[in-house]
Amino acid sequence: MKDASAKPSLFPISRRDLLSIIGTAPALAALGISAGPAAAQTTQINPNSTGVKTMASTITTRDGVEIYYKDWGPKSGRPVILSHGWPLNSDSWEAQAFHLAQNGFRVITHDRRGHGRSSQPWDGNDMNHYADDLSDLIEALDLRDIFLAGFSTGGGEIARYIGRHGTGRIAKAGLISAVPPLMVKTDNNPDGLPKEVFDGIQDASLADRSQLYKDIASGPFFGFNRPGVKASQGMIDSFWLQGMMAGHKNAYDSIVAFSQTDFTEDLKKFDVPTLIVHGDDDQIVPIDASGRASKRLIPHAELKVYAGAPHGLADTHKDQLNADLLAFAGA
């Protein structure tokens, strides 16, 4: 007799029946997969095929690292590349990538080496390698006339890319809550943060990096530690999940890369229209040592200061940022 107390299944058919249905030749053909012996093999999709649209893929860099990337929007659209922050991945850009792609741009977002779905090499977790990986991605996709923008650590990546590879393929640049020109405090950079701050982050990463990511996300990153600010558990969970997807060693090394790399000379090579966006309540990358300092090194740049915005403004102020990026990219 059927147990009347049993909860109804979420699926009207069994898993076995479902697999038998999707395994039929017509269903597989609809997915572009052969029902023959080759069906068990990995399907290779040509991104240039008529009627086929890949949403993600990988490239292999000059030193053998696999870089995962997403390619959204029409292939004929003007290309936009968005580089993510620490310890996140390309998912952190999805609001902006979706908005720009819906408005006709071809948007590329990638997982930096050691982060997200990319390889986790033991070595090379530094800005020079990050920039060269970005160059390999741009050349592999043969992208030109690019709007190249980076958030936080990603701002350092694109600055070093321009410093090492120039702007021959770049039409515009964007620095969003970005770490340049230099985060750490030095004699020449008195507005920076003491090195002990970043040493402490590395220590916390070794002690319990899962808790570290939760503490950052639930506190200063999104400004949830400010009085009267309502925290979003979804934003906190997303930050933690992306952080835990990063390689332990890669994320640990990257703390030094984003905090102690001096991008001063790189910024001086910005000879394209540049947008700088920064929140004036950024507790992670304070605006005076970053956004305003970058503006002084790139006099032609447009600086937009978001009043009261925290570091993670791509989420907390996504509508405002979406509008500003679209207007700048389309100008």
Image: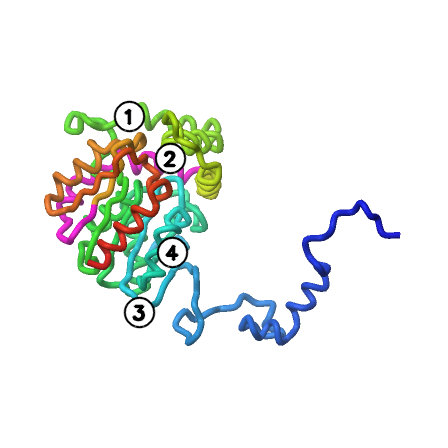
- Amino acid carrying label 4: it is Phe
Give the spatial CA distance, label 2 vs label 3: 35 Å
**Secondary element at image label 1:** helix
In the picture of the structure, the residue carrying the numbered disc 1 is: 195
Task: Choose top left, top right, bottom left or bottom right for residue 70.
Answer: bottom left
- Residue for point 42% across, 74% down: 49
- Residue for point 24% across, 54% down: 327
318 is higher (above) or lower (below) than 329: above
Residue lying farthest to the front in this orientation: 228
Specify whether 267 is left or right of 10.
left
203 is higher (above) or lower (below) than 300: above
56 is higher (above) or lower (below) than 227: below
Give the spatial CA distance, label 3 vs label 4: 16 Å
Is label 1 or label 4 in front?
Answer: 4
Give the spatial CA distance, label 3 vs label 1: 45 Å
First in residue order: circle 1 vs circle 2: 1
Give the spatial CA distance, label 1 vs label 4: 37 Å
Tell me where the magenta segment starts and ends, as one range.
Answer: 247-275
Instruction: Check residue 98 in the rendering and tell me which mark sits there, or answer none.
Output: 4
**Secondary element at image label 2:** loop
First in residue order: circle 2 vs circle 3: 3
**Secondary element at image label 4:** helix
Instruction: Check residue 76 in the rendering and tell me which mark sits there, or answer none.
Output: 3
Is label 2 or label 3 in front?
Answer: 2
Task: Choose top left, top right, bottom left or bottom right for residue 231.
Answer: top left
Cβ atoms at labels 3 and 4 below 8 Å apart: no
- Amino acid carrying label 3: it is Ser
In the picture of the structure, the residue carrying the numbered disc 2 is: 222
